[in-house]
Image: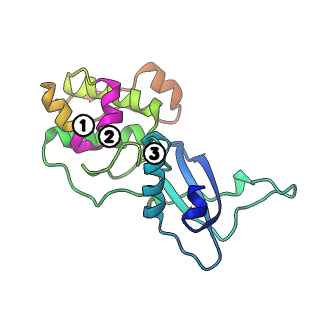
């Protein structure tokens, strides 16, 4: 219903890529050219943050199999430009810098600013538990999982950490847990907050 009212003829939403992000593949209705940011705002009004697609890819038509079903294997991987992020704002302090590094590591993305939202970048509940675990290691603070859902941007989480009395430990290694190691067999290297 949302997609019909926003000028789309067809849409498919799939988990894509190594980071397993929700991607909306959109086919505009004839004569329409919907804006991805407007689509996101419509989704945000109706859905919880973790269900809102992280990327919107416009297609001429959805790829179909010879049986007329969606050919998921033929859907293109979204490029970094398809991710709808806020305008980049660099970290202003050690806590924001550390959180940006943790976001990048957990979500396997290249760039994160302090106004970028965790779920908007493709995070989901499993990523959120990794974020909480690494935040505890890095800042010596017990950040409740709910905080990630309530304050999902780097700036908001940094404020929560400050309110909880967390201290940045920028030179401390943040290692992947055993579970994280098993979930990411290709990334068996240590993740550090200081980029070493």
Residue 154 screen position, x and y as percent:
26, 43
Vertical comparison of 62 with 168: above or below: below
Colour scheme of the rendered structure: rainbow
Judge the density around disc 1: few (<14), some (14-19), many (≥20) Cα neighbours within 10 Å: many
Query: Residue 182, position in %: x, y?
Result: 52, 24
Mark 2 Cα within 10 Å, few/some/many (few <14, many 20+)? Answer: many
Q: Residue at x 29, y 38 (%)?
A: 151
Residue 195 visible, this angle:
no
Label 3 or label 2, whichever lies nearer to me, is 2
Disc 3 is placed on an element classified as: loop
Residue at mark 3: 122
**Label 1 or label 2, whichever comes before in sequence order:** 2
The number of callouts visible is: 3
Indicate which disc, 1 or 3, sits on the residue closer to the N terminus.
3
Q: Which residues are magenta?
A: 144-157
Residue topped by disc 2:
152
* Quadrant where the C terminus is found in the figure: top left
Q: Is residue 34 above or below residue 129?
A: below
Residue at 19%, 49% in the rendered image: 91
Disc 3 packing (10 Å; few <14; some 14–19; many ≥20): many
Q: Residue, x 32% and y 40% (percent of image)?
A: 152
Task: Residue 10 in the image: state x and y as whole percent.
Answer: 66, 62
Whether residues under marks 1 and 2 lie with C-beta atoms below 8 angstroms apart, the answer is yes
């Amino acid at each position: 219903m949302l997609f019909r009212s926003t000028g789309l003829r067809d849409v498919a939403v799939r988990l894509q890529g190594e980071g397993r992000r929700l991607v909306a593949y959109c086919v505009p209705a004839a004569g329409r050219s919907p804006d991805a940011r407007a689509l996101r705002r419509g989704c945000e009004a109706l859905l919880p943050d973790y269900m809102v697609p992280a990327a919107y890819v416009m297609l001429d038509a959805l790829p179909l199999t010879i049986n007329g079903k969606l050919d998921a294997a033929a859907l293109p991987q979204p490029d970094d430009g398809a991710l709808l992020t806020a305008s980049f704002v660099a970290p202003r302090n050690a806590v924001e810098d550390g959180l940006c590094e943790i976001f990048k590591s957990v979500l396997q993305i290249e760039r994160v600013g302090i106004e970028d939202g965790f779920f908007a970048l493709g995070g989901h509940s499993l990523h959120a538990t990794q974020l909480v675990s690494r935040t505890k290691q890095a800042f010596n603070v017990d950040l409740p999982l709910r905080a990630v859902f309530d304050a999902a941007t780097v700036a908001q989480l940094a404020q929560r950490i400050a309110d909880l009395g967390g201290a940045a430990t920028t030179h401390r290694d943040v290692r992947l847990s055993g579970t994280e190691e098993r979930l990411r067999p290709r990334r068996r290297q240590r993740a550090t907050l200081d980029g070493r």
